[in-house]
Amino acid sequence: MKKLFVAAALSAAAICPSVATAADLTPADFKNAAKYCKALKAEAGGANFISMFGTKKNAYGKCVSQTAKKTATEDDAQAKQARAQAVEECRAVKTEGSKNAFGKCVSEKAKAKKAAADKEDEAQEDDRISAAESCKTAKKDAAKFATDYGTAKNAFGKCVSKTAKQLATERKAEQETATA
């Protein structure tokens, strides 16, 4: 009986973290993921989209599920990081004035940092959709595409990943040039 109780307690402890992660997902996460996946599928084309996410029957569902989970996890991490950075910045400023000046400072800075992170996330999604469109065009030259990305099932995904990273690098360089 004691062994059974210990086993049940360990099982519950192992399950709890995954339940907490699933609770972080909101309907908005799934709605935004569905929009993103729909756009990605349109730009990549059906066969290419399937090669990125799975079988014909469940590729769209996998895309939505993976994207929603990734977004929720990233949003949580970004919010924590924004708050931690805001606390450090507000401590450095040594806010004075009203009784809750420090709290207001942290709140304002954390919101601004989170908004900036959300804007970057949207830009990365746009980069990936643009990359899918570019890779779909590049795939028309089968020999060059095979040389550059291989012939494995994940070749299109490799192309999208590499192209999206290039687009992000170019976008960041343009932003730095504009602010300099």
Image (cartoon, rainbow, N blue to C red):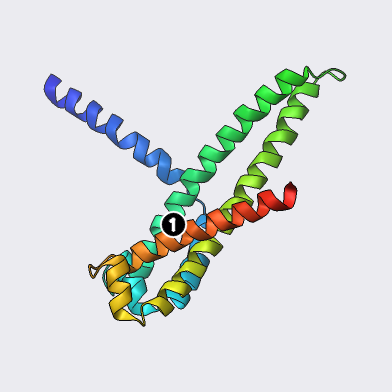
Identify residue type, mark 1. Answer: Thr
Looking at the image, which residue sits at the far bottom? 140
Classify residue 16 by image quadrant.
top left
Q: Is residue 162 above or below residue 140?
A: above
Outermost right residue: 97
- Residue at x 57% of width, y 33% of height: 81
Is 80 left or right of 43, judged from the image as shown? right
Q: Which residue is mark 1?
A: 67
Q: Position of residue 109 (x, y in %)?
A: 72, 34
- Expressed as whole percent of the image width and height from the top left, the position of residue 164 reads 47, 60
Q: In what quadrant of the picture does the N terminus appear?
A: top left
Q: Secondary structure at mark 1?
A: helix
Residue at the image point whose x is 44% and y is 57% from the top: 67
Q: Position of residue 42 (x, y in %)?
A: 46, 77
Using a 10 Å C-alpha cutoff, classify the residue at mark 1 as few (fewer than 14 neighbours), some (14 to 19) or many (20 or more).
Answer: some
Relative to 61, is 38 on the left or the right? Answer: right
Q: Residue at x 74, y 46 (%)?
A: 180
Q: Name the foreground residue: 40 vs 61.
A: 40
Where residue 117 sits in the image (x, y, percent)? Answer: 61, 46
Q: Is residue 32 visible to us here?
A: no
Up the image or down, 137 lies above or below 129; here it is below
Q: Nearer the viewer, residue 146 or 8?
A: 146
Q: Quadrant of residue 23?
A: top left
Q: Residue at x 43, y 51 (%)?
A: 69
87, 104: nearer the viewer: 87
Classify residue 90 as left or right of residue 131.
Answer: right
Along the viewing direction, whichever of 93 and 107 lies nearer the viewer: 93
